[in-house]
Amino acid sequence: MKPTLILTLFVLTISKAQDLRKQTHDSVFTHETKKKVPAKVLHAEPLYIDLIRDLGARKGEKEWNVGFGITDRTVFDEYEALIEYEWAPVDRLGLEVELPFSIYPPFQNGNGPASRLNSLKFAGQYSFFVSEKIQSSMAIGYIHEFEMTAFENYGKNGLFTGNVYNPFYIIAKRWGHNFHTLWYAGPQFTHHFSNGGIETNWQMNTNVHYMISGTRNFIGVEFNKNIGNNYFEMTMRPQMRVGIADNLLIGIVTGIPVSRENERLSTFLRLIYEPGHKK
């Protein structure tokens, strides 16, 4: 065999080995890169009692919410507003800060409720189970509220009137490509500073949504249930969410109480802005 042919075969063998090592390295790198991205299932998030962050949240996700609503309280109207910021500092952990307001028209006799910033609200939520195989997610979370006095009492009495402690649990399931269900429940303990008493009630919310394929638009309904000593309240909230832009959505909610003893119909509008969101 000629030396030139031997040299050519040797070079081709070395080149082939290098290509094989490169392909193996690329395959391992791609596999490791994919492993670094945690699993996440797209679930329809309720619009009225919303989640702290998406289930299976990924580090760097963030979202601004602004909400406006009006409720017919039989003898007066209640206007509500909220400003909310939520973000994921690490994978699967969502944090939230919210400022909820209640605004009431002036009453001639002065006996009506007073407008206020209801509380300083802080919350966290951790998705401990996410399965793409069975299209399900589970999470635990905690909400803490520092309840505040009415605007008219600022400077007269203490600024804070109590604490609200609210742990909760979430189970969500996606059925096929379009149908979504979510169950959200937990006890709520309200500690009043005025008398030291603690009031306990349970919040249980069930949700069913239909999401349009290829979009994040959906229609659905929330069933918000509040259970306490000797009372049960439930409000059905038909709703829809529509994407205005890739990072901007609008949610529209109607509230229909089962019992109209304390309230009648209500409406609520939520604007959702996701800075840095990529389609």
Image (cartoon, rainbow, N blue to C red):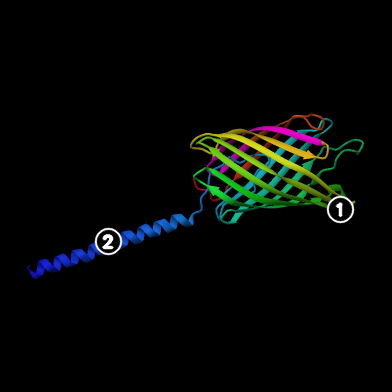
Q: Are marks 2 and 1 in contact (CB under 8 Å)?
A: no
Q: Looking at this view, is 235 or 206 the one in front?
A: 206
Residue located beneath label 2 in the image: 19
At horizontal 51% and vertical 38% (from top left) the residue drawn is: 215
Of residue 233 and residue 152, the one placed in the foreground of this image is 233
Q: Position of residue 246 (x, y in %)?
A: 52, 43
Between disc 2 and disc 1, whose residue precedes?
Answer: 2
The local secondary structure at tag 2 comes to helix
Q: Residues within 10 Å of mark 2 (few under 14, many from 20)?
A: few
Identify whether 158 is placed above or below 114.
below
Q: Secondary structure at mark 1?
A: loop
Q: Which residues are magenta?
A: 231-251
- Residue positioned 48% across, 57% down in the render: 36
Q: Which residue is mark 1?
A: 193
Q: Is residue 253 a member of the stretch shown in magenta? A: no
Residue sticking out furthest to the left: 2
Q: Quadrant of the N terminus?
A: bottom left
Q: Which mark is residue 142?
A: none
Q: Residue 243 sits in which quadrant?
A: top right
Question: Quarter-wise, where is residue 205 in the image?
Answer: top right
Q: Is residue 232 magenta?
A: yes
Q: Is residue 54 visible?
A: no
- Report the amino acid beneath label 1: Phe
Residue 38, position in %: x, y?
Answer: 51, 53
Neighbor class of circle 1 (other Cα within 10 Å; few <14, some 14-19, many 20+) is some
Expressed as whole percent of the image width and height from the top left, the position of residue 191 reads: 83, 51
Relative placement, left or right, of 23 versus 121 is left
Cα distance between the residues tagged 2 and 1: 72 Å
